[in-house]
Amino acid sequence: MNAINGSSIVRGSSWLRGSMDAEIFPKDISIIENPLKARCFSSRPFDSEGLKTYSKTIVSDGILKTWLLDLSCGKKLNLDSTANAVRSISAPPTPGITNITFTNGLKSKLDLMNDMVLL
């Protein structure tokens, strides 16, 4: 997930820097973040900068739709924060992620395991 972290995008160290709205996964793959998911350890109504969190689709049908941004990274990229700021006691906020869900794709678990064995 470091490749979609706003800090990596700002530094230019992410291989996804120029990939917004580009296909980065097969069409049947989506990644969704839901920081409001009930009874999950990392759920939170607000990020570390006080912004209200919300569910967001990061990858939709294989296409990158957003990076993870805090206020600082958003400002440097001329974008709005995605309310993904996290922090520790001794560090400033940085973009982070919580409660992600991947879609299943087209193959069954057994098919995927068989593909791995054949490698």
Image (tube, rainbow, N blue to C red):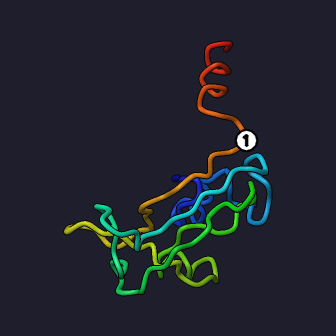
Q: Is 21 on the left or on the right of 101, as rendered?
A: right
State which quadrant residue 106 falls in: top right
**Disc 1 packing (10 Å; few <14; some 14–19; many ≥20):** few
Q: Nearer the viewer, residue 86 or 13?
A: 86
Provide residue 9's location: percent of width, then percent of height.
60, 63
Residue positioned most to the left: 89
For residue 87, above or below residue 75: above
Provide residue 27's location: percent of width, then percent of height.
79, 51
Q: Residue at x 75, y 57 (%)?
A: 61
Q: Nearer the viewer, residue 103 or 20?
A: 103
Provide residue 118's location: percent of width, then percent of height.
68, 12
Q: Which residue is mark 1?
A: 106
Q: Residue at x 68, y 55 (%)?
A: 16
State which quadrant residue 53 falls in: bottom left
Give amino acid for label 1.
Leu
Provide residue 69's location: percent of width, then percent of height.
52, 73
Residue positioned most to the top: 118
Q: How many marks?
A: 1
